[in-house]
């Protein structure tokens, strides 16, 4: 007599037959938690089904392994196996095509999300038009001979730059004199000594005193007391 469809025996039997693989009590209990069956009830159902010959089992020490009875399943012949293999290959091909299609759709969605909306484009256009207008105003002033920087401001900047360059040149000269004194009678190679102390010349960091000095108009350069 078959167990009632909603009984623990029926639920466990249906699961074991569906899985058709070796299972222990814990495997079944974990999988059937949604039916609110306790592990003790699962164990009782498995033992009952095994005693009734509805499932098979083997003992490995203290543990029992349960499996569906294989004589209830139809064993396919070679022709049926080949058909199943062909169907499986076709399904795999369809799966790959679906994955590719999904990837293309996802890429398209990502591309669309990265594009500006119509509202954002309109806002961007307004900003760009305002920027163009500001640049046109400046350009018209330059064409009309209008000085955008007042002479006194330019004079102040040039004076400050000249002073900084003068200090740079002075300190560079002081360092050279001191360095020459330190290394004149030193047994160490000046280059190695410099690296040991972590000293870097302007040239080592891509800086040129002359390039900054050239920014000052010729008539306003300070005398170089070298």
Image (cartoon, helix red, strand yellow):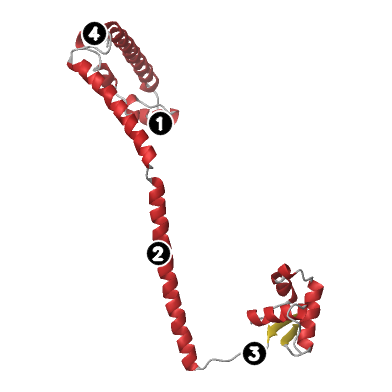
Write down the residue under mark 3.
70
Question: Which disc, if any, is residue 101?
Answer: 2
Q: CA distance from mark 2 to mark 3?
A: 40 Å
- Mark 3 or mark 1: name the one nearer the start of the chain: 3
Q: Position of residue 116 (x, y in %)?
A: 37, 42
Write down the residue under mark 1.
195
Residue shown at 36%/41% (left/top)?
A: 118
Examine the rendered structure and indicate whether residue 56 appears above or below residue 152.
below
Task: State left or right for residue 54 relative to residue 162.
Answer: right
- Mark 1 or mark 4: name the one nearer the start of the chain: 1
- Mark 2 or mark 1: name the one nearer the start of the chain: 2
Which element carries disc 2, helix, strand or loop? helix
Q: How many marks?
A: 4
Q: Are marks 2 and 1 in contact (CB under 8 Å)?
A: no
Write down the residue under mark 4.
220
Query: Between tags 3 and 1, which lies in front?
Result: 3
Residue shown at 77%/77% (left/top)?
A: 8
Which element carries disc 4, helix, strand or loop? helix
Q: Position of residue 223 (x, y in %)?
A: 25, 8
Query: Between tags 2 and 3, which lies in front?
Result: 2
Q: CA distance from mark 2 to mark 4?
A: 71 Å
Examine the rendered structure and indicate whether residue 204 appears above or below residue 31.
above
Examine the rendered structure and indicate whether residue 136 appears above or below residue 70.
above
> Split into 4 quadrants, where in the image is the C terminus?
top left
Residue 62 appears in the figure: no
């Amino acid at each position: 007599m078959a167990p009632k469809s909603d009984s623990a025996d029926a639920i466990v039997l249906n699961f074991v037959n569906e899985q058709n693989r070796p299972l222990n009590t814990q495997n079944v209990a974990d999988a059937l938690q949604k039916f609110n069956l306790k592990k003790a009830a699962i164990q009782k159902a498995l033992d009952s089904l095994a005693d009734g010959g509805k499932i098979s089992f083997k003992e490995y020490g203290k543990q029992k392994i349960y499996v569906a009875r294989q004589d209830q399943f139809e064993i396919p012949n070679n022709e049926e196996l080949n058909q199943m293999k062909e169907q499986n290959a076709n399904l795999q091909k369809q799966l790959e095509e679906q994955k590719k299609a999904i990837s293309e759709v996802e890429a398209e969605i990502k591309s669309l999300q990265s594009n500006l909306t119509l509202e954002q484009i309109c806002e961007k256009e307004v900003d760009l038009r305002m920027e163009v207008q500001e640049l046109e105003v400046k350009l018209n002033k330059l064409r009309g001979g209008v000085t955008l920087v007042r002479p006194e401001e330019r004079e102040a900047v040039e004076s400050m730059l000249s002073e900084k360059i003068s200090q740079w040149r002075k300190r560079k000269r002081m360092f050279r004199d001191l360095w020459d004194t330190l290394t004149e009678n030193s047994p160490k190679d000046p280059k190695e000594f410099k690296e040991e102390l972590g000293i870097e010349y302007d040239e080592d960091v891509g800086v040129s005193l002359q390039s900054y000095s050239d920014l000052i108009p010729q008539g306003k350069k300070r005398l170089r007391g070298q």
